[in-house]
Amino acid sequence: MSGDKVGVMDTDGPVLIDPRQFARARSHFAAIFPAASLSRLEDVLASSEGSVQVLVDGHLDAYDRPSLRVVIKGCVELACRRCLAPMAITVALGRELSFVEGLSEFEPSAEQEGDDRDVLPLVAQLDLRELLEEEILLTLPMAPSHGPGKCPNRVEVSSVRGDGTRVAVFSKLGEMLSAVPGGDAGDSGIREKKNAGD
């Protein structure tokens, strides 16, 4: 794939480019991926709502290596670990990728020292969708949660009195504790009675 490409990628098929050709032609790729089309994220997403936009610019880096400048931004939904309700997570990241011919997957490049870009082995074809999914997976929080007291599915534990009125269990417990000798001290009053008995 070379030249400009803009559109909504609403299928889950591969989006293949030749990194060397893409970089030397200084090609540009821009597309919106609905969350529902990102199959590798299916197990971590709470819903198919949301989408991400990916921008990829090809160029040669200072060492004349084929390189990609990747920007990903958008929003997806994860399940809150407290209430399990979907919550929106913003995705915003940028990466610089350079490709080196003959570099094994786990072999660091001598030129990589002091360079903040990632150096990858040069491949004949790169799947931009797979790259996008991998980058999103790496940036998503492991245990997302709403702020304290902000879960929409909060359950209030309550009981019904004989007259049909509802009262929160913990407020009733507070009334019981305050009735213990010693006032609000509650448990300290109990300790005092134990000490007096001793």
Image (cartoon, grey):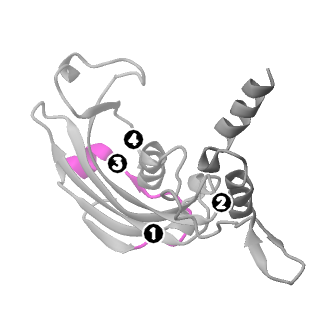
Residue 189 position within the rendered picture, expressed as x and y whole percent measured from the top left:
68, 39
Residue at x 77%, y 77% (from the top left corner): 166
The residue identified by callout 2 is: 84
Circle 4: element type? loop
Q: Nearer the viewer, residue 162 or 85?
A: 162
Residue 83 to residue 177: above or below = below
Give the foreground label among 4 and 1: 1
The reply to whether the C-beta atoms of the residues labelled 4 and 3 are less than 8 Å apart is yes
Q: Earlier in the sequence, mark 2 or mark 1?
A: 1
Give the foreground label among 2 and 3: 2
Tag of residue 51: 1
The quarter in which the N terminus is drawn is bottom left
- Residue furthest right as drawn: 162
The residue identified by callout 3 is: 18
Q: Amino acid at mark 1?
A: Ser
Residue at x 34%, y 22% (from the top left corner): 103
Give the foreground label among 1 and 3: 1
Name the image quarter holding residue 47: bottom right
